Amino acid sequence: METKPRIAVLGGGSWATAIVKILTENLEQVNWWMRDKECANHIMQFKHNPRYIQAIQFDIDKLNINTEIQKIVDVSDILIIAIPSPYLAKAFDEVEVTGIDKKIIISATKGVVLGEPNRIPARYFHKQFNVPYEKIGMIAGPCHAEEVAMERLSYLTMACEDIEIAKIMANAMSCRYIHTSTSDDLFGTEFSAILKNVYAVASGIYHGLGYGDNFQAVLISAALRETKEFIDVVHPIHRDVKSSAYMGDLLVTAYSQFSRNRNFGSMVGKGYSVRSAQIEMNMVAEGYYAAKGIYEINKKFQVKMPIMEAVYNILYEKISPIMEMKLLAAKLS
């Protein structure tokens, strides 16, 4: 494949918007599918996304935006999927899209695919579209869209079983404010990215309940151990979970002011119902859906995961956050 293949971003949210910004630093053209025609027209006229990360100003001469997904798929070699996991299957179910099996798929979706039998995105694309695993990749690492907009230095890892594809993506997304690395651990990075959202919800709940930084450090240390134990069972290969694709992403999601999962958890800890917290945020907190997905997946593997189970109990079994997190805190001591 040519060193600068035709790349598309599918999705119109904050992370999709940030990824398009990064790609325009290197590519002469970025193909971009978004559902909302009014939003697409606004970008072409006013050079920014009216709904997400409005501070990002685009060079519209580099954008090929279309609201028909098939037209974007047809003119692209690599599809970066940046659709939130609750809407991923729906986006492809609404229209019949052909030719995806011939593309390289890069997931920027960090969640369990809603409506599927607890599938992570890589497995969804493999089963749904017959894309070989070696042609599926993952964008991992600590990188909030808001900091991309401010061009603050960030680090991303491109994970793919075919390391040459990982290198192509690393080159495409490397720029002055984005440093990139590669990995062959597709499943480990993807499960880690899903789990860190669950642990960020836990961190937020504790914050809402009034626990301090000292305890948060204990919680996140335990969350990293829990992550390692789970992904080592699910996909047992050698990996260093202390690297940025795992530990770094966990830390920023658990602590950052931009973390929607932490903010969602904080509201739950302060007494909001799950539904009222979702309405108040008006954004997707993937940790809510991930808690149930990982809970169901772990029925097969039976890994001891007290933090994940505590979050699941609060969000889905309606257990009191005060009581559940007090019990969890005792287990972490």
Image (cartoon, helix red, strand yellow):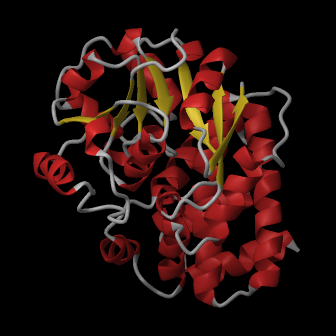
The residue at the far right in this view is 333
Residue 279 placement, left or right of 235: left
Q: Position of residue 305 (x, y in %)?
A: 73, 54
In the rendered image, which quarter is residue 183 located in?
A: top right
Q: Is residue 244 above or below residue 206?
A: above
Q: Is residue 26 above or below residue 160?
A: below
In the rendered image, which quarter is residue 47 located in?
A: bottom left
**Does residue 79 appear anywhere in the picture?**
yes
Q: Which residue shows up at 74% across the image and 42% down it?
A: 230
Residue 268 placement, left or right of 330: left
Q: Position of residue 256 (x, y in %)?
A: 61, 71
Q: Which residue shows up at 60% across the image and 39% down it?
A: 174
**Does residue 90 appear anywhere in the picture?**
no
Q: Position of residue 22 (x, y in %)?
A: 48, 44
Residue 136 placement, left or right of 330: left
In the rendered image, which quarter is residue 269 located in?
A: bottom right
Q: How many numbered marks, from 0 up?
A: 0
Q: Which residue shows up at 22% across the image and 28% down it?
A: 69
Q: Is residue 117 above or below residue 25?
A: above
Q: Nearer the viewer, residue 169 or 244?
A: 169
Q: Position of residue 194 (x, y in %)?
A: 58, 47
